[in-house]
């Protein structure tokens, strides 16, 4: 049985290259992520595209338990600046290992506190597939990268429309059943990219300001389609609200590493009242931080 709960929570908006993320700094139970996230996403004043829940100075969850490279590098900057526990790192530049939902092991993030530049090493795809039966025929045969916590399709030289995205989404859900999926509409000549991401658990679709794991996927696709020798191939991927620098390192003829980096803007933390459906036993589980 559920009931409507109203709580005051502390959030902070981070803007990694236009991919605005609301970090919930107050504790929350995983079973309440969905309700809290939906409330925050509906508050257009914050302009958040996604919601993350801080668990410690080295770990966080996305609301749909997906993987998000942009959120990882934004979280690393929050941690390094002491905005989670009040203890900032001593050096301006630091390297952190960050654990997050959707990832099997921590990822390495590099942070420059002064310039607010942050990078994240993105795990290589677990599998490379192609999309098969799809109502939108131009998407058939396009590359699908099964990443940790999210699945991306590279729609190279395909123009976005709401209709073709819905058709691609349905085909991807039927064939891969991911908790989160993205379609990267990539212009291979200009390197302009429109990232559209769907998260199943919160039933949200956004044309994102930018997408970190999608940028890494695009760098992987570009490098493997054009690399003629070993080396690090770098790309400036221009997206609706910002640019992400993404690179793919080829060694021995095979992709070995993916990296995304760019500027992260941080707002001041703010208390807000959230209202959502929660189990009746939640009141007893509330921490003193609420």
Image: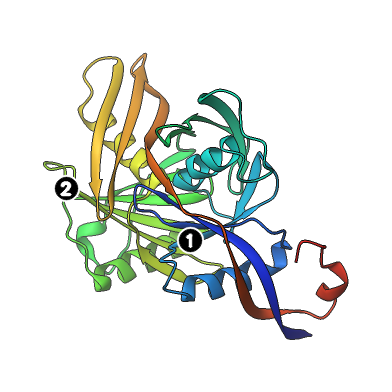
Q: Position of residue 75 (x, y in %)?
A: 54, 44
* Image side of residue 257 versus residue 66, left or right: left
Query: What is the crowding at mark 1: few (fewer than 14 residues within 10 Å), some, or many (at least 20)?
Result: many
Identify the residue at the far right of this view: 284
Q: Position of residue 100 (x, y in %)?
A: 61, 45
- The Cα–Cα distance between marks 2 and 1, rounded to whole angstroms, is 25 Å
* Image side of residue 137 versus residue 276, left or right: left
**Residue sitting at 31 percent across and 69 percent down?**
167
The residue that disc 1 covers is 50
Q: Quadrant of residue 133?
A: bottom left
Of 267 and 211, nearer the camera is 267
- Comes first in the chain, label 2 or label 1: 1
Mark 1 lies on a secondary structure that is strand
Query: What is the crowding at mark 2: few (fewer than 14 residues within 10 Å), some, or many (at least 20)?
Result: some
**Above or below, 46 relative to 72:** below
Q: Which of the numbered marks, if any, corresponds to residue 187? A: 2
Of 134 and 208, nearer the camera is 208
Residue 177 visible in the shown view? no
Identify the residue at the far left of this view: 189
In the rendered picture of this protein, how many numbered marks are placed on residues? 2
Q: Position of residue 215 (x, y in %)?
A: 34, 42
């Amino acid at each position: 049985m559920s009931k409507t709960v109203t709580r005051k929570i502390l959030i902070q908006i981070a803007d990694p290259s236009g991919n605005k993320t609301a970090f919930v700094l107050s504790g929350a139970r995983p079973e309440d992520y969905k309700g809290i996230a939906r409330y925050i996403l509906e508050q257009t004043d914050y302009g958040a595209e996604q919601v993350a829940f801080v668990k410690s100075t080295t770990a966080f969850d996305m609301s749909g338990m997906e993987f998000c490279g942009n959120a990882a590098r934004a979280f690393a900057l929050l941690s390094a600046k002491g905005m989670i526990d009040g203890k900032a790192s001593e050096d301006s530049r630091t390297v952190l290992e960050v654990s997050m939902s959707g990832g099997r092991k921590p990822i390495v993030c590099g942070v420059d506190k002064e310039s607010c530049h942050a990078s994240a090493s993105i795990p290589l795809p677990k599998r490379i597939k192609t999309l098969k039966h799809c109502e939108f025929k131009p998407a058939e045969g396009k590359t699908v990268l099964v990443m940790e916590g999210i699945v991306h399709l590279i729609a190279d030289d395909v123009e976005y429309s709401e209709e073709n995205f819905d058709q691609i989404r349905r085909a991807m859900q039927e064939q891969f059943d991911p908790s989160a999926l993205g379609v990267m509409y990539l212009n291979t000549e200009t390197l302009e990219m429109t990232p559209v991401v769907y998260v199943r658990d919160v039933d949200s679709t956004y044309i994102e300001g930018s997408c970190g794991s999608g940028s890494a996927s695009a760098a992987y696709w570009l490098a493997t389609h054009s690399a003629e020798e070993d080396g690090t191939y770098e790309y400036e991927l221009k997206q609706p609200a910002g640019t992400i620098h993404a690179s793919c390192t080829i060694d021995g003829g095979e992709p070995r590493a993916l990296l995304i980096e760019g500027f992260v803007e941080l707002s001041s933390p703010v208390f807000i009242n959230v209202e959502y459906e929660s189990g009746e036993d939640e009141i007893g589980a509330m921490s003193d931080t609420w």
